[in-house]
Amino acid sequence: MRALTRRRVVASISTAILASLGLVGCSVGTASTGTEPDTSLTVGLLATPGNLDYTTTAGAAIPQALLYNVYEGLVKLDNDGTIMPLLAKSWTVSEDGLVYDFQLNKGVTFSDGSPFTAASVKFSLERVKDNWTANGPAYLDPIAQIEVVSDSQARITLSKPSNSWLFNMSGPVGSMFTESGIADLATDAVGTGPYTVSSFKKGDSLVLATNADYWGEAPYMSDVTLRYFTDATAQTNALLSGDISLISGISQFQLVDQFKSNADFQVLEGASTGEVTLSMNNAGAAFSDVRVRQAVMYAIDRQAVLDTANSGYGLLIGSMVPPTDPWYDASLADLYPYDPDKAIELLDQAGVSDLSVAFKIPNLPYAVAGAQVVKDQLDKVGITANVTVLEFPAVWLDEVFANHDYDMSLIMHSEPRDATSFAVPSYYAAYDSPEVIAKFAQADAADAATHVELMREATRTMTEEAAANWLYLQPAISLAEADLLGVPKNSPSLALDLSTIAR
């Protein structure tokens, strides 16, 4: 009944819009023949999940599919990046910024029928420290204690004030689980969200079906199929032929223009948090010297990489900070101008010649295209980049991310506000700066103004020390059939929130 009501409301709103445009004779959702509205949706994506467990498997593909759709947290980010209530209907914060009291929505159940209560909050968040190995378990380090005040009230006490922890709670680490639903997270996802996983065929598709007992407003789409493509051209051809209805986050931007002049489709251009990064293994022999890393910075014409990989779509940023973050510093985009002579000079100062590096990249279109430009430009300064294309996510995550078996890679970091995780020495880039780590810690506990100032200082130091070469910010461009409503325009989080989409 809830789903039917929502569909009628959406249809009424859409009809009102059409009427305002003088199109009162047009129908929305239901054809004039009286047939049922199309409530099935097929979305074309490229990065495929290796499994369903984002507690132990890194990468954006799993939370893109499951976060907010199958798994929910106390809070979420709306499409503008604002923290909004979700399983918590409200919360209060003590004057010292240490104690958060969350009032929980009542009558919420997990898809296996288990009740969601404050005990679920305690269980879920306490699991992060000991059981999570991916997607930022350290984000919850500020939590000192979790108390069950009542079934509908959870109290979380921090060890120190933190500007970031509630924001981080909107991501994967804030997901709520039930004790009866964690036996096999890789194949069985049990959450409180509006959808459940109906089927999962690795490398092919993931099908979501409406959660009949969902506690909130039922989504318009009764079922959603996420189809995974290895080729962006095949992906766009599928949209043109009607096999899919939506491409969320197109990766080959030379394919966009054909849709701009086609009235059957809409092109949605928004903001993302995806920093396309030329990573260097700071702990490896090739790049342990900061002068060699800085040489790479000067050797790369980032605009040329952007033009080749993205047909010019995107933004040169120069740091691991997108413009949507308060501490974004636009000047860092110009800190290392393209200067091959300066690169050669720095290599000479470091006593490095005829350097050969293992350049391991994922088999993703932007990485393959961008890597060729990088290879050609490094050749000009005497660095030979031996490119190896690895299957993503499985092989790349194993060799590069987990085992640090690489010298250089090219990958997009999609996690919001992820500069702090990049600065952890055990991270795959192995960037080790006690000064930056200390400054991030000071920023997190500071007042709002000082927080921004210290974050800006720390991220500038990362760029100055060439922790990585942040090539450009990936734009969020989605292609959709013209009749789709509520398609998320921006990508402020890892989630592709399907609950807002209707026809």
Image (spheres, rainbow, N blue to C red):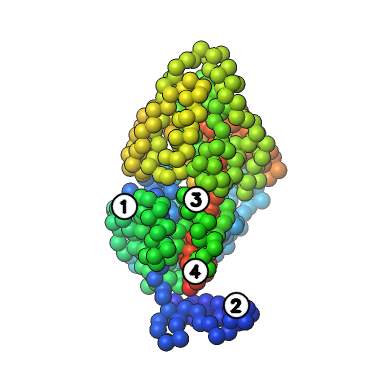
- Badge 2 marks a residue whose secondary structure is helix
Determine whether 352 is above or below 429 in the image: above
Determine which of the numbered discs, if any, sits on residue 254 in the image: 3
Mark 2–mark 1 Cα distance, whole angstroms, equals 39 Å
Determine which of the numbered discs, if any, sits on residue 264 in the image: 4
Determine whether 227 is above or below 194 in the image: above
- Badge 1 marks a residue whose secondary structure is loop
Who comes first in sequence, dot 1 or dot 3? 1
Q: Residue at x 57, y 55 (%)?
A: 270
Amino acid at pointer 1: Gly
Q: Which residue is mark 1?
A: 203
* Position in image of residue 277 (x %, y %): 50, 37
Q: Residues within 10 Å of mark 3 (few under 14, many from 20)?
A: some
Who comes first in sequence, dot 4 or dot 2? 2
> Foreground: 24 or 181?
24
Who comes first in sequence, dot 3 or dot 2? 2
> Foreground: 100 or 407?
407
* Position in image of residue 182 (x %, y %): 32, 54
Mark 3–mark 2 Cα distance, whole angstroms, equals 32 Å
Cβ–Cβ below 8 Å for labels 4 and 2? no
